Amino acid sequence: MNTNIIIAGVGGQGILSIAAALGSAALTNDLYMKQAETHGMSQRGGDVQSFMRISDEPIFSDLIAKGKADIILSVEPMEALRYLPYLKKGGYVVTNSTPFVNIPDYPEMEALTQALENLPHRIVIDADAVAKEAAGNIRASNFVMLGAASPFIEIPFDYLEAGVRDIFTRKGESVVEMNLKALHAGRAFALARK
Amino acid sequence: MEKRLLLGVEAIAQGAIDSGLSGVYAYPGTPSTEITEYIQLSKQAIDRNIHREWSSNEKTAMEAALGMSYAGKRALVCMKHVGMNVAADCFMNAAVTGANGGLVIVAADDPSMHSSQNEQDSRMYGKFAQIPVLEPSSQQEAYDMTRYGFALSETVGSPVMLRVTTRLAHSRSGVRTGEVLPENKIKLPENPQQFILLPGIARKLYKLLLAKQADFKEASANSPFNLYKEGTDKSLGIIACGIGYNYVMECFGGRPPYPVLKISQYPLPRKQMKQILGECERILVVEEGYPVIEELLKGYPGDKRITGRLDGTLPRDGELNPDLLAQAFGLPVEEGASVPEVVAPRPPALCTGCSHRDVYNALNEVIRSYETGRVFSDIGCYTLGALPPFRAIHTCVDMGASITMAKGASDAGIFPAVAVIGDSTFTHSGMTGLLDAVNEKTPVTIIISDNESTSMTGGQDSAAFGRVESICAGIGVDPAHIRVLNPVPKNHEELCRMIREEIEYPGVSVIIPRRVCIQKARRDKKA
Ligand code: SF4
């Protein structure tokens, strides 16, 4: 198996927690993985991305080559489109539909929705609403997103559950449960629309 | 052996701890910051009481690390590439004194300038100082080579540079850790004159450094990290340095048809270099950073067999990636759909509620009434004041340059000359410039936008915490012209008035708008 995932968002949206859960899932199951992330100036509200590569064979490059990403997992709709040159033919875009508007020239929602609808393989999900409904807290929306991406990732779902458990254990069982609920709700949403 | 998920920089930190490290010295700077932060949070480091406080700047860090090496213990000093410029005085001379306890200097370069002012290549510094340089290609190597670096430093009696670039620094992978070594005991240098660089002694020590070059070369020749991979197609030979090696391997699924020489230790291993140059028709040099090796091989007349960044096979600037390498090899790049036009750029910006915003709002309002006013700024979050909606600053060059450039511009007749600098940058390199201005009573208005934090790099403690006014007074600024205020919106008028008054004062004045960085406050609350 060999999965390349681009996780996209805006500095401050916490995309690294998604990467951390995936990383933990890979490591505890003895898979190879490399995950490049953005630190520094862009973290001040700029576009940020993490290149996540998981494989059962050694991985060389920390970066994903253009046209080689299996999936773009974005926690923000405009950011989902920024990385399309990296998406392989037939690859999925899984994105949150809630915009994060922190620039004056943020596009019209209509144009943005249209651009997303033009994508042949996509899951667009209001992760904030799903998180609120399923987990009772919009802070779990990143894990709704991971759940929604899970049907397109070649990692067994129980590995992902264990990954989420692992990164939140420190914060107590209720936080673990909240994020697991979000993960399941996101997955159910995507499976219904795959 | 335990396997952990570590960033490249964290692997360096763990490698140092496991090598019996006694102290880390650093000033925060992307992409090097997390080395020190990792050690600060490491239980192992806390239990052993490894020195892990931040230094005021890279020069004080390098000097303190050299002092620890003098005492026979192992020291690590970490900085971003431009920090090397600040530390260069000590760095160059430390090559002449040599090390006693193992001394590893981490220089984290930032090609493509993700968070920097230039993309200088620290390998040039290594060559300049004539010391061994290590360049890992993976997180595992970052760990292993840090350990190797400490051992090498003590065997050859020299500081060793470990050079990484942003991509390795900030990429995570599984790392197998090894045996934990005990710290060194205090052991003074055998030669009591080793650290006395008086000309008569320095000349001897410099000859010693020149003589050591043979040892450095031998270490490179036998280095387990320089690797010659045979290939059947000799029409091309690839010399790949550091993480450049990964991109080459990626292009060929790990099995390139051409011979590949992986370089992870300098000076260059002569025998292997000769082999690849001898057996291949054309050479591609893959370097993350400047074309250091390529230029050397090409020579002044310009050997056409040597290709890389200088002949356009690879771009002259910016970081490498697998696509650029694929193009260089004539392999197809299967680019996906293009980015739709609706996607707008999203540059970084000051956080909502950031105190620098309020400072720029006031400063802009005041400076508008002077046609010739110029604002000299510095390195930090507040550099983002150059972008809309503020467009408030006219310069940003290097740490501390705001005060001194404002001084020079004022000397040239510019009025008002205003400097905007952060509290941490002020103690890093602004204080000496302030003394220059005080000594000459230069009419400059210096705004130290004090958010009690080193924010750009993640909210590390500021060396001047709670003492900015007293430092300014100590340097000789008239206390009547040191003015402190919380720049909340309701104080906007007062801040404007203050700035106007101090601009009109024909001498050095310091205004200190003070409010804690909101990210720092959030982080401290969590901790
Ligand atoms: S991190 Fe702090 S200093 Fe930087 S922009 Fe945000 S609030 Fe301002």
Image (cartoon, rainbow, N blue to C red):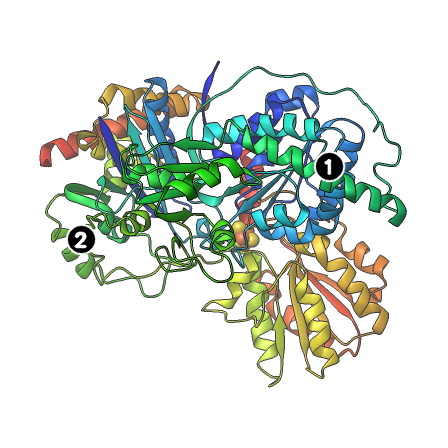
Q: Residue B391: which numbered mark, if any? A: none
Q: Amino acid at mark 1?
A: Ala
Expressed as whole percent of the image width and height from the top left, the position of residue A155 reads: 24, 25
Is residue A62 at least partly visible in the picture? no
Expressed as whole percent of the image width and height from the top left, the position of residue B65 reads: 73, 37
Expressed as whole percent of the image width and height from the top left, the position of residue A100 reads: 33, 52
Expressed as whole percent of the image width and height from the top left, the position of residue B183 reads: 70, 20
Q: Looking at the image, which is closer to me, B508 or B124?
A: B124
Chain hosting mark 2: B
For this orientation, the residue located farthest to the bottom is B371
User: Which secondary structure lies at badge 2?
Assistant: loop
Residue at (19% x, 50% y) in the render: B336
Residue at (15% x, 34% y) in the render: A190
Q: Residue under circle 1?
A: B65
Please name which of the two marks, 1 or 2, marks the residue nearer to the observer. 1
Q: Amino acid at mark 2?
A: Ala
| Ligand 1 neighbours mark 2 (CB distance < 8 Å) | no
* Res B278 → quadrant: top left
Label 1 Cα neighbours within 10 Å, binned few <14 / some 14-19 / many ≥20: many
Labels 1 and 2: the sequence-earlier one: 1
Q: CA distance from mark 1 to mark 2?
A: 51 Å
